Image (cartoon, rainbow, N blue to C red):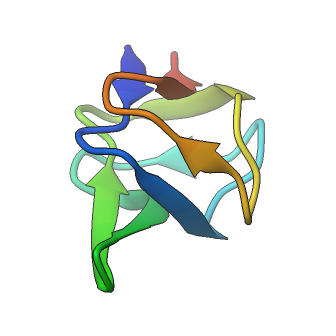
Amino acid sequence: ATLSSPMPGKVVHVLVAVGDAVKAGQAILVVEAMKMQNEIKAPRAGSVVSLWTQVGATVSAGEPLATIG
């Protein structure tokens, strides 16, 4: 499953690394938009296959952020 950013903003925290096991609903990273921090959560359990962003990156709405396999 590919996680995409629901809104434009700035990545302020990356909470996992490639290879980490995650649970459904676990926070993967945090995107700040208009001074509000929004947790991006895993849609299902699995492991982090790839991360396409890093702390400090500016992301667009719909931009892929990570893949959970």
Q: Eyeballing the image, is 54 above or below 5?
A: below
Q: Eyeballing the image, is 23 above or below 16?
A: above
In this view, the residue farthest toward the front is: 34
Q: Viewer-proximal residue, 26 or 60?
A: 60
Q: Residue at x 57, y 32 (%)?
A: 47
Q: Residue at x 46, y 23 (%)?
A: 63
- Quadrant assignment, res 14: bottom right
Q: Residue at x 74, y 63 (%)?
A: 55
Q: Viewer-proximal residue, 32 or 17?
A: 32
**Quarter of the figure with the N terminus:** top left
> How many marks overall?
0
- Quadrant assignment, res 13: bottom right
Horizontal and vertical percent position of residue 16: 65, 57
Q: Is residue 35 left or right of residue 48?
A: left
Q: Eyeballing the image, is 59 above or below 49?
A: below
Horizontal and vertical percent position of residue 12: 59, 73
Q: Residue at x 34, y 35 (%)?
A: 45
Horizontal and vertical percent position of residue 20: 68, 46
Q: Is residue 18 left or right of residue 41?
A: right
Q: Viewer-proximal residue, 52 or 49?
A: 52
Q: Viewer-proximal residue, 34 or 46?
A: 34
Horizontal and vertical percent position of residue 27: 38, 62
